[in-house]
Image (cartoon, helix red, strand yellow):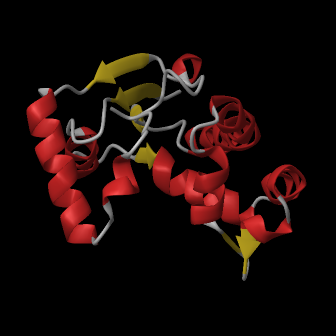
Amino acid sequence: MAIKVGITGGIGSGKSVVSRLLGIMGIPVYISDIEAKRITNTDEVIRRELCALVGEEVFQNGELNRPLLAAYMFGYPERTKEVNGIIHPQVKNDFRQWAGRLSGKPLVGMESAILIESGFRDEVDVLVMVYAPLDIRVERAMRRRFFKGLGNEAYRGSNEW
């Protein structure tokens, strides 16, 4: 059975660098952000529950309408908690299946900025907290935002700081 290593830290802390290094060493890493986006667009339970909560327009052309969902949640912690309560259990189940398929590996990783906050701490055997000083994290996040062409609101109110 694989030892599951959780990789967490704030925006710009270096989680992705750690995950890439593990990958170079042949250790598979489940990237929660990527997988959550995939699952949110493909899982019928999530689709049905988000549509019931937010409205049918939360999906457009089979894709999650991220700006609409963000606007629905922004400034309403209870709404964010409800949305997370729909998505996180499905991601947790997907991670368990993924890790089960890789049980023959000595190590697997899970990268998540909100690993502890989203209730995934019990899913991993070891927790690695990646840290960088706030000024460096802000600089990295702003550089990433610039290169991706994101507006200033991209990181506003994020739970990942």
In this rendering, position of residue 24 left or right of residue 84: left
The quadrant holding residue 77 is: top right
Residue 46 at x, y percent in the picture: 79, 52
At x 64%, y 35%, the residue is 76
Q: Relative to the observer, which residue lies in front, 3 or 136?
A: 136
Residue 9 at x, y percent in the picture: 31, 29
At x 66%, y 43%, the residue is 97
Q: Residue furthest bottom?
A: 61
In the depicted structure, whether residue 68 falls above or below residue 24 = below
In this rendering, position of residue 153 left or right of residue 32: left
At x 54%, y 36%, the residue is 103
The quadrant holding residue 145 is: bottom left
Residue 59 at x, y percent in the picture: 74, 70
Q: Relative to the observer, which residue lies in front, 32 or 138?
A: 138
The quadrant holding residue 87 is: top right
Residue 85 at x, y percent in the picture: 73, 34
In this rendering, position of residue 99 left or right of residue 14: right
Q: Relative to the observer, which residue lies in front, 19 or 113?
A: 113
Q: Which quadrant holds the C terminus?
A: top left
Q: Relative to the observer, which residue lies in front, 157 or 66?
A: 157
At x 53%, y 27%, the residue is 1
Q: How many marks?
A: 0
In the depicted structure, whether residue 132 falls above or below residue 121 = below
In this rendering, position of residue 133 left or right of residue 30: left
